[in-house]
Image (spheres, rainbow, N blue to C red):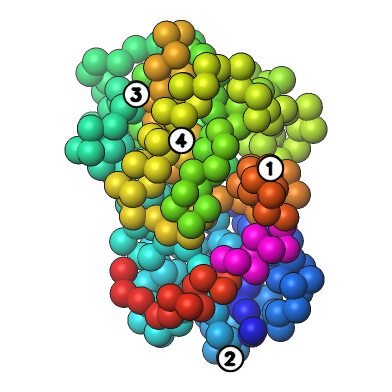
Amino acid sequence: MRVTVLLGGPSAEREVSLRSGKAVADGLRSMGHDVFEADILPRNLAGLDHAADVVFPVLHGQFGESGELQDILEARGLAFVGAGSKASRLGIDKAATKKAWEKAGLPTPKYEVLSTQDPGLRSLAAPCVVKALDSGSSIDVHLCKTDAAVRTAVADVLGKHGRVLVEQFIKGPELTVGLLEERPLAPMRIVPTREFFDYQAKYSDATTEHRFDTGLPAEVNELCRELARKANAAVGAVDLARIDIMIDEQNRPYLLEINTLPGFTSVSLLPEAARHAGVEFGPLVDRLAKRAFARGPRRG
């Protein structure tokens, strides 16, 4: 099968995307596919003119994961892996995602959205987490233990993005649940040696542990799997996704965010969870490409 792998892109997650895309391309080639790699940008879509049976986007962050690229693929009538434009636009916006989960009756930490026009907090105070609304890979995420730190972080993120999410801090372990073909894989406990699972812990720090033995009761693990399934359904993501969950001191889970196009580097979490389920990397990307081809072009 002819597969175009899209990698790179214009976002702050470009370097991760280049690594992920190269791994996906190599995996597809190992399964016998004819692979064309294209580093595309909003002003340069020439890579999409290459004849392909299916497109495998591996562009993280803005443009590639936020609905714009998916709009283009849908308009061109191309079969592609992953969420459509509607789910991508919802999933990239942390506040919109949380609203969708609240509407579905799913637990998520309390939050406020601030903007440059309305930068003042109303109900939340330190400790809390300050985040950009539409960045992944823990870029522009601040764990703030004092009100002064909150003000500094809010000003920093507002200056870069114009909007910011301030979220209740949940003290306890962090789990992530990968979804393959809308089915949840085994929960994985993230144990960073840094203060929290930031960009360096995800991609540079070899001491970060990923534990399938979460140390939590079996019923909590199963509840997290079911919450991840429902959370993914509320967003409408398909083929692959990853849901991040915090567990409080009473073992109650809270949904943090969804990644509708999770990383595919050598240390990425979804491929690791799939491997734990018996699906190696080559068969994983082969399976996703074939599923997208069988589904064909779509709208939204």
Residue beneath the point at 41% across and 22% down: 253
Query: What number is the disc on residue 109?
Result: 3
Residue pointed to by mark 4 = 225
Residue pointed to by mark 2 = 51
What crowding class fits label 1: few (fewer than 14 Cα within 10 Å), some (14-19), or many (20 or more)? few
Residue 193: x and y in percent read 71, 20
Q: Is-magenta flag for residue 272? A: no
Looking at the picture, does residue 226 appear above or below residue 126? below
Given contact means CB atoms under 8 Å apart, are the residues at marks 1 and 3 in contact? no
Residue pointed to by mark 1 = 276
Foreground pick, 112 / 253: 253
Disc 3 residue type (three-letter): Pro
Mark 2–mark 1 distance (CA, rounded to whole Å): 35 Å
Q: Secondary structure at mark 1?
A: helix
Chief secondary structure of the magenta span?
Answer: helix
Query: What number is the disc on residue 189?
Result: none
Residue 86: x and y in percent read 31, 61
Q: Which numbered disc, 2 or 1, marks the residue closer to the eye?
A: 1
Pointer 2 or 1: first along the chain? 2
Disc 2 residue type (three-letter): Ala
Pointer 4 or 2: first along the chain? 2
Pointer 1 or 3: first along the chain? 3
Q: Which residues are magenta?
A: 281-288
Q: Secondary structure at mark 2?
A: loop
